[in-house]
Image (spheres, rainbow, N blue to C red):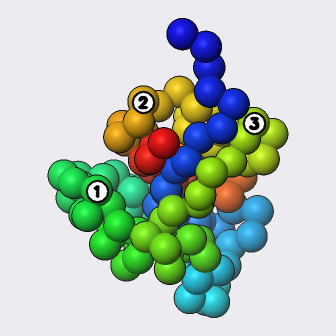
Amino acid sequence: MSSPTQVRASHILLKHTGSRNPVDSYRNKQVTRSKQDAIDGIEQIKSQISSHEDFVRLAQEFSECRSAANGGDLGVFGRGQMQQQFEEAAFALQVGELSGLVDSDSGIHIILRLG
């Protein structure tokens, strides 16, 4: 099977003080948590996800990306459009699959592949 050239994915992002832009861009507030606290937070959020509806609700409540307004939905993107770690994880998922923790320059993510 050939690799897709585009995917559609949602994510939940928790930033930390070492993130490239440690500001919650959805709520416009400074992020002061450590990287370990971001990892712990994402693990706790992930443990609450048992459906797509849970993911959307938790993204709206906790994600520190502007995509939180859309339940974390980033839309369709191709290779080279996202940070490498994020892209590799998103393209490796099957449709409907939830990633493990993904560490990028932006922070700690979990990714749900939508298409």
Furthest-right residue in this view: 80
Question: Toward which corner of the image does residue 60 lie, by quadrant?
Answer: bottom left
Q: Residues within 10 Å of mark 1 (few under 14, many from 20)?
A: some
Q: Nearer the viewer, residue 106 or 51?
A: 51
The image shows residue 68 at horizontal and vertical percentages of 50, 74
Rounded to the nearest whole Å, what is the CA distance between mark 2 and mark 3?
16 Å
Regarding mark 3 in the picture, which secondary structure is present there?
A: loop
Q: Which mark is residue 94?
A: 2
Q: To which quarter of the image does residue 59 belong?
A: bottom left
Give the residue type at disc 1. Answer: His
Name the residue: 44% across, 47% down: 114
- Within 10 Å of disc 3 (Cα), the crowding (few <14, some 14-19, many 20+) is some
Q: Residues within 10 Å of mark 2 (few under 14, many from 20)?
A: some
Q: Is residue 17 above or below residue 102?
A: below
Q: Residue at x 68, y 72 (%)?
A: 22
Q: Residue 98: x percent and y percent?
A: 37, 41
Residue that label 3 marks: 79
Q: Which element is circle 2 on?
A: loop
Q: Is residue 89 left or right of residue 43?
A: right
